[in-house]
Amino acid sequence: MHAAPETLDLLDDLLSEIRARAWLAERKRGIFYRKSAGWLHFHGRPGDIHADLKVGRDWVRYPANNRSEWRRLLAALDRSAPAA
C-alpha cells in the first residue's frame, strides 16, 4: 500500500523538490511517472517512510525519514534521469 496522505504531508518539501524535475509527472500525490512507466512512489508511516525508485529494471528502496535521507534519494533520482 502506498503512503497515506498524512505520511505524505511529512514529505511536502521533498515532494516539491521532486516535482521540479520536469521529466517526471505526478499522477497521484507522491506517485511519479516517467512517460508511462512508474518511477517513484512512497510507502510507510511516520518514522518508517521509504521510497521505491525505478533503477534500470529494478525497484530500489530508499529510506525517506529525514533531510539527510532525502538528499540521498534525490541524488539517486537524478542519477536515474534519462539522458538529455
Image (spheres, helix red, strand yellow):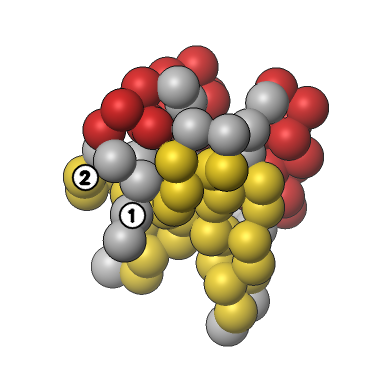
Q: Label 2 sits on what residue type? A: Lys
Residues 45 and 55: in front is 45
- Residue 33 occupies which quadrant of the picture? bottom left
Q: CA distance from mark 2 to mark 1?
A: 11 Å
Answer left or right for 82 relative to 33.
right
Residue 17 higher or lower than 34, as above or below: above
Callout in the foreground (2, 1) = 1
Answer left or right for 82 relative to 12.
right
Whichever of callouts 2 and 1 sits on the residue coming sooner in the sequence is 1
Badge 2 density bin: few <14, some 14–19, many ≥20, Cα 10 Å = few
Q: Is residue 68 visible?
A: yes
The residue where tag 1 is placed is 2
The residue where tag 2 is placed is 28
Q: Position of residue 59 (x, y in %)?
A: 57, 72
Q: Cβ–Cβ below 8 Å for labels 2 and 1?
A: yes
Residue 14 higher or lower than 64, as above or below: above
Q: Position of residue 55 (x, y in %)?
A: 63, 69
Q: Which part of the image, by quadrant, shows the N terminus?
A: bottom left
